[in-house]
Image: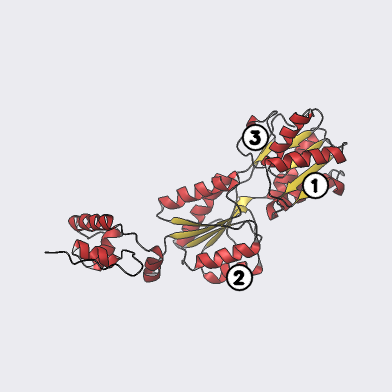
């Protein structure tokens, strides 16, 4: 039997009907064969797959979700891709979800509430099966969008006991307080906090620093160095020079992120400032390279890969309507003491 000539749509996109004509079967058989349904003869499956491969057919997941009411996409909103912290998080998410047959639809918010709202509106048009969002702080409009969408949602990187909220993370404020107490335990008395980006999690670490120093009767607001610029090694070096130039009595600096602290260690090496003899330096997140600095950097190790995996597993339970025993999972953190303190 001669195969009917294909008539591509105006868009040039090969359709399921095109595959059906090429394989000489019905469109419903093509659909069932490509979905891997049982009951479809193996020879038919091979024929359909060969036709799809020959034509370069790519299924339209949005159309499939609309027709079946079931999506295999999970929308993921993260602040940045330039930070290894979120790369580790994403890799764990994708690895976990792909094993369960889901794909990720990634949006980068750049720590901008309005951009997050816009991205969420766009992603909801694709009818995602679930949402993974970073942090708890967002606009009222975005919160309303999530609530009204009916799409299961898990919040990552923060732990909160808010009723009805699903989250996986740890207490940023407690981690900030514990690192500050570590510096106090080493005999440091004038401890500065240096923060960049000033996103909600940085401000929570700042709050922890304030709490620990207030408890010790050592808090001094003039030792807060806050810069809204993106966190980077270069900025850390500049902040170190500024702090040492304007506050020479400081004996420790707690940086809100490791890249800032790495920059500070490089600046100290360049300027001949001995660490930790003259000044102690601590960071946050235990990013790649922190253990290779001179001296190695004391930091807070955060479980971002574990958070990505646990949040994905929680979302999988919600998407399949299984009960979640613990809506808020606190995975904790670890103070990693190295040579810089």
Residue 276 image point, x, y percent: 77, 29
N-term-proximal mark, 1 vs 2? 2
Q: Which residue is pictured at 33% across the width and 65% down the height?
A: 12
Q: Say if mark 3 contacts mark 1, CB within 8 Å.
A: no
Q: Residues within 10 Å of mark 1 (few under 14, many from 20)?
A: some
Q: Which residue is mark 1?
A: 225
| Disc 3 from disc 1: Cα separation | 22 Å
Q: Quadrant of residue 36?
A: bottom left
Q: Outermost residue, left direction?
A: 1
Q: Which residue is pictured at 29% across the width and 59% down the height?
A: 34
N-term-proximal mark, 3 vs 2? 2
The secondary structure type at the circle numbered 1 is strand
Residue 234 image point, x, y percent: 70, 41
The quarter of the rendered structure image containing the N terminus is: bottom left
Front disc: 3 or 2:
3
Using the image, determine if residue 38 lies above or below residue 82: below
| Disc 3 from disc 2: Cα separation | 40 Å
Residue 209 image point, x, y percent: 77, 46
Residue closer to the observer: 286 or 3: 3
N-term-proximal mark, 3 vs 1? 1
Q: Which residue is mark 3?
A: 290
Residue 141 vs residue 122: left or right? right
Q: Quadrant of residue 133?
A: bottom right
Q: Which residue is pictured at 22% across the width and 57% down the height?
A: 45
Residue 285 vs residue 18: left or right? right
The secondary structure type at the circle numbered 3 is helix
């Amino acid at each position: 039997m001669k195969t009917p000539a294909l008539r591509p749509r105006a868009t040039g996109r090969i359709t399921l009907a095109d595959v059906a004509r090429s394989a000489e079967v019905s469109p419903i058989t093509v659909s069932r064969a490509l979905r891997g349904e049982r009951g479809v003869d193996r020879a038919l499956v091979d024929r359909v797959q060969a036709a799809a491969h020959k034509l370069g057919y790519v299924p339209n997941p949005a159309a499939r979700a609309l027709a079946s009411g079931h999506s295999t996409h999970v929308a993921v909103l993260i602040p940045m891709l330039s930070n290894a912290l979120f790369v580790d998080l994403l890799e764990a998410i994708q690895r976990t979800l792909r094993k369960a047959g889901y794909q990720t639809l990634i949006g980068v918010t750049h720590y901008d509430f309005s951009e997050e709202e816009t991205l969420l509106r766009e992603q909801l048009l694709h009818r995602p099966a679930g949402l993974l969002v970073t942090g708890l702080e967002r606009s009222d409009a975005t919160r309303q969008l999530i609530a009204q969408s009916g799409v299961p949602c898990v919040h990552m990187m923060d732990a909160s006991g808010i009723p009805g909220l699903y989250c996986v993370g740890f207490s940023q404020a407690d981690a900030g307080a514990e690192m500050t107490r570590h510096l106090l335990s080493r005999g440091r008395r004038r401890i500065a906090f240096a923060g960049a980006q000033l996103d909600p999690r940085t401000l929570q670490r700042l709050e922890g620093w304030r709490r620990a120093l207030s408890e010790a009767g050592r808090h001094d607001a003039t030792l807060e160095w806050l810069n809204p610029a993106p966190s980077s090694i270069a900025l850390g070096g500049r902040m170190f020079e500024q702090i040492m130039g304007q506050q020479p009595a400081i004996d420790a600096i707690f940086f809100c992120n490791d890249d800032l602290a790495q920059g500070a260690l490089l600046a100290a090496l360049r300027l001949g400032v001995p660490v930790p003899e003259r000044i102690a330096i601590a960071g946050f997140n235990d990013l790649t390279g922190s253990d290779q600095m001179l001296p190695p950097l004391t930091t807070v190790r955060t479980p971002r890969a574990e958070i990505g995996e646990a949040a994905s597993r929680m979302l999988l339970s919600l998407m399949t309507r299984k009960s979640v025993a613990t809506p808020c999972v606190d995975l904790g953190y670890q103070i990693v003491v190295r040579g810089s303190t």
